[in-house]
Structure formats: C-alpha cells, structure tokens
Amino acid sequence: MRITFYGAAQTVTGSQHLLEVNGYRLLLDCGLFQGRRAESYERNRKLAYPAHKIDALILSHAHIDHSGNIPNLVKSGFSGPIYATPATSHLAKIMLLDSAHIQEDDAEYLNHKRRKKGEPPVEPIYSTADAERVAPHFQDVPYDKAFEPIPGVVARFVDAGHILGSAAICLDIEEKGQRFSLWFSGDIGGPDLPFIRAPVLPEAVDYLMMECTYGDKRHDDPQKAYDELRETVQRTIARGGKVIIPAFAVGRTQEIVYSLHRMINQGELPSIPVYVDSPLAVNVSEIFRQHPECFDEETRQFILDDRYHDLFGFHRLTYIRSVEESKALNERREPMVIISASGMAEVGRILHHLKNNIEDPRNTILIVSWQAPNTLGRRLAEQETRVKIFGEEYIRRAEVVTIGGYSAHAGQPFLVQYAKAVADRVKRIFLVHGEPKAASALLEKFSENGIQRVEYPILNRTISLS
C-alpha cells in the first residue's frame, strides 16, 4: 500500500490523502486549500492526481477544508461513491452548494472591479451546477457499521467529536496476503465540547494518521471562553458598538448562538439583537435539529428543559437569508451581535460587514476560530492596523478580541492521549493538518511520553506501507 499526502501536509487546510491498495485508489477527504488568494486559486483548480482514476472517496466530515474541492473532483472526472456519515452527507451537500455560490458571487464582484482596471476576468473554481452534481455520489454509512469502499479494504466510522457527524476512519486492509490497519483521525474534537459526543480513542492500529492543529497549545477552559464572550459583548455594548464575529457556519456559529442564548436568558446580557447572517448557517442549524443521534446526553436534557425547546432559537435571535436584510444591518448603528461566515473572513457576507464596521472604534471584531496563514482572519488576529478587503485598504480602528476556548479541535494534552492509546503497537504515526510550529511542539511532547516512530510528511510525499 502507498499513501500520498496531497493536502494538509505541513499546513492546516486542503485535506487530501490518497491510498493505493490492490491496484485501486481510495481518497480520504478532498478539501479546499486556504491561504494566499493566488496560490489557493491555482492549487484548488489543478488537482495533483487524475480524478477519473479515483475509485472511491471517504469523507471524515463536512468542513470545507476537508470537503470543499469535491465538486472540482467530480467536474474533473471522478465517478465513484463518496462515503460519509448521514449527518456529514446532509451537511456537505448544502455546504458545497453554498461554497459554489460564494465563489460565483465573489468572482462576479472582483470581475466588476477588474473590468474597470482593464484586467482579465477570473473564473470560480467550480460552479453551482458542478456542486449540484455531487449529491448522487454520496452513500450514507452510520457510525460503527463496516463497509468495503474498495476491494481488500473494510472501513468503519467512529465518532471524532469535532462537529456534527464528524468521524475518524478506521481501515482494515488486506493486500498480497498481509493484513494491517490504518486509522485516519480526521479532525479530533476536545473531550468537553458542547452538543456532540466525545471522540473515540484509536485502538489496535498499525498506522495512525492524525491531525496536530493545536499541537502546541492547551485550550482554555470552556467556562473561561464563555466569560470572555460575555465580557466582550458587555464592553462593546457599553460604548454603543457592534460585535462582528466571523464564524464557521457549522459548529462554531451554533456554539456562539447557544452561549448568547444562555446569557440573555439568564440576564447576563441585556436583551440586544443577535443576527446570524449566513444562509448556510440557517440551513445548518436546521440540520443539527434533524440529527439528535449525534447529541450527547447533556444536550438532550437542555432541549427538554429549555422554554423554547430549541438549542439555536430565542426571542432576540434573527436568522438572515436575503442580501437586502444583510445590507440593512450595515445601515443600523445601535448595538448588536452579527455572526457571519466565513470563519477565516476570506469569502462571503462577513467581508461586507468588516468593510463597513472595521474603521469604527466602537465596534469589536471577535475571532473565535483558528485562522490560516495569509487569510484576512489571521491578519486581524495578529492586530494588523491596515488590511485589504476586496482589494481596497482599510484602517482598522475596531477592537480585535481573540477567544481560543471555542476551538472544535483537541488541544495538546488530548492529542498526546490520542497517540498514547496506540503507542505500544503502532508502527508509524503521521502528523497532518498542522503548521510546523504546532507539529514541532507535539513531536517534543510525544518524545517526552515515549511515543516514537512519528513523522511529519511534506506535501506530495508518497510513502509505502506494509
């Protein structure tokens, strides 16, 4: 068997890992790379392998950095099945349509400016029509049910505890009379995240491929994150400003809404308007409601006890769908909270909210997610005072606050625990989905805990396993 790391290698985005077994090709994830616009555009449009030769795809979860290039894969000739948990399949179908729509809108917006400058137009990586062609490829498989994606490989999903429907992928492989196992973690959630069940630890595997996004960090206590959110909103309201939150439509938006729901119900915040300005987040919240099988016991009890019997709905919360309603928010001057996608502030309606609010010192831009290098979100998190939005420079006068405790990824201690679960048997561990600084810190911590045979593969590296 051979494995080639075509994405999320020594970086966090663009997860794509190709396995070659028994003459067949199995792809684990097919995500969008996020970074400098020109580099991202080229890497995402040009797949590093012939799509028509991929026999099957297994998707760990629906986040765009793991699923977002599937329409391009299908457009380029892939015709096989896509295996995912039911919740992941449900989420991915609408997220890919939304991704295509955003790319088309942003290309149109940029091309309007490029025409004025006499520059040639840009094309979206894929269209809405391309995204629509993905849905028939999905095959839903529940957690812990064995399936055979290609001959000689038996797979099953186990709970990754990251977002709704997220899974680690356990593969039992037989090739040339040899049997061995590979466990791909996908994105690993923390043990105490709201709503969903805790991640399952790996066991009895020969090869472990695991993420290391926060290999250098311990996450703050969830209560601390809750307190910081409350204090940030209180402080911004006191000076008459808006809180603008770039948030991923899946997971992070629902966590923030749930926290604000609690704060307003309990009188910790005044009854200010809260807007979720993302058609995708509106749809995602409804999908969350349709998959209670993914909820933990505490969440089920909250729904029973809440006067609204709803995790993501309360009297001051408004979900925004139309462009007109979205634009109207920027004409209002009273205090409010606006939660909008994308989480790294690279595309979508959040760019318009930032453009219209970044130069007002009363406002706060609240960062609640990890930000990839060279994204607008990272530049804001690093407190840059001059940033470009849609090609135009703005002076940042708004306060920027970063809260780390809302991460849906495991911190260093749990990553160590994850690897230790198989340290006595595993032949090799491959660290993916992490920057060099995080990987280096985690490698050092692994060494301290007697975890050996760990590698950090570079992009496009092929490794033979047996």
Image (cartoon, helix red, strand yellow):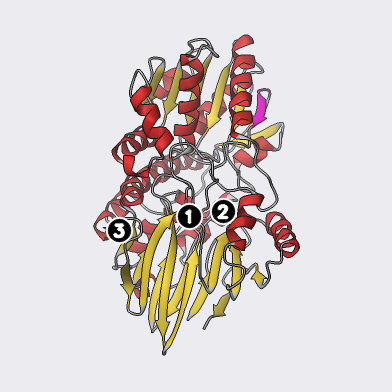
Tag on residue 224? Answer: none
- Secondary structure under the numbered disc 3 in the rendered image: loop
Where does the image place residue 93, in percent across and percent down from the top left?
A: 32, 49
Q: Residue sitting at 27 percent across and 56 percent down?
A: 133
Q: Nearer the viewer, residue 297 or 28?
A: 297
Q: Which residue is mark 1?
A: 200
Residue 14: in magenta span: no
Tag on residue 38? Answer: 2
- Secondary structure under the numbered disc 2 in the rendered image: helix
Where does the image place residue 452, in percent across and percent down from the top left?
A: 68, 70
What amino acid is labelled 3 in the image?
A: Val
Q: Is residue 3 left or right of residue 175?
A: right
- Secondary structure under the numbered disc 1 in the rendered image: loop
What amino acid is labelled 2 in the image?
A: Ala
Measure the C-alpha gap from mark 2 to mark 1: 38 Å
Q: Is residue 220 left or right of residue 271?
A: right
Identify the mark nearer the N-term, 2 or 3.
2
Eyeballing the image, is 277 above or below 280?
Answer: above
Residue 326, quarter of picture: top left
Residue 29 in view in this figure? no
Q: Are marks 2 and 3 in contact (CB under 8 Å)?
A: no
Q: Which residues are magenta?
A: 397-402
Q: Residues within 10 Å of mark 2 (few under 14, many from 20)?
A: few
Q: Which residue is mark 3?
A: 141
Measure the C-alpha gap from mark 2 to mark 3: 37 Å
